[in-house]
């Protein structure tokens, strides 16, 4: 699934949540991009370099996305930094390593 899908009320579909849970193991940047596309309140996303902050705004669709992310064990254990009461989550994505030609 390249882009998230939504039901008629704007909630992420089961297919979208399943895609988050089963996203390729080491594609942290792709997963973060997919989650940002699925997020209902784009103004509640802050990105700076490798840092990503998501705030659910109390919306249950965003909370479903967070629960799906929690089930992506590799992403959550590598990228999650902290959570705060009220639905705020901070992540730090790993550096992208590039192979230089000599």
Image: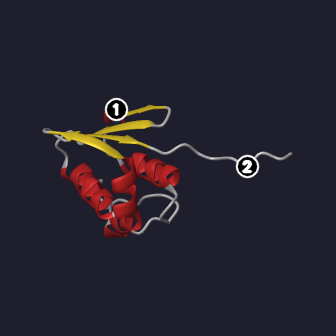
Does the rendering let one see residue 88? no
Q: Please report the residue visible at 24 percent of the width from the left and 53 percent of the height from the top.
A: 61
Which of 4/92 is in front?
92
Q: Is residue 22 above or below residue 64?
A: below
Q: Please report the residue visible at 19 percent of the width from the left and 41 percent of the height from the top.
A: 87
Which of 39/102 is in front?
102
Q: Earlier in the sequence, mark 2 or mark 1?
A: 1
Task: Say which residue label 2 marks.
Answer: 99
Quadrant hosting residue 88:
top left
Q: Indicate the secondary structure of the residue bearing disc 2.
A: loop
Q: Please report the residue visible at 19 percent of the width from the left and 46 percent of the height from the top.
A: 59
> Which colouring convention does the figure follow?
secondary structure
Q: Position of residue 26 (x, y in %)?
A: 51, 60
Q: Is residue 85 above or below residue 11?
A: above
Q: Position of residue 14 (x, y in %)?
A: 31, 69
Badge number at residue 43? 1
How crowded pointer 2 is (Cα within 10 Å; few <14, some 14-19, many 20+) is rated as: few
Q: Position of residue 35 (x, y in %)?
A: 40, 51
Does the rendering let one see residue 47? yes
């Amino acid at each position: 699934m390249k882009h998230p899908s939504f039901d008629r009320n704007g909630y992420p579909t089961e297919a979208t949540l399943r895609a988050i849970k089963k996203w390729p193991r080491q594609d942290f940047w792709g997963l973060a991009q997919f989650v940002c596309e699925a997020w209902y309140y784009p103004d509640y996303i802050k990105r700076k370099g490798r840092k990503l902050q998501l705030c659910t705004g109390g919306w249950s669709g965003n909370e479903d996305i967070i629960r799906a992310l929690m089930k992506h064990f590799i992403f959550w254990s590598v990228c999650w930094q902290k959570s705060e009461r009220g639905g705020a989550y901070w992540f730090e994505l790993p550096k992208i390593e590039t192979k230089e030609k000599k």
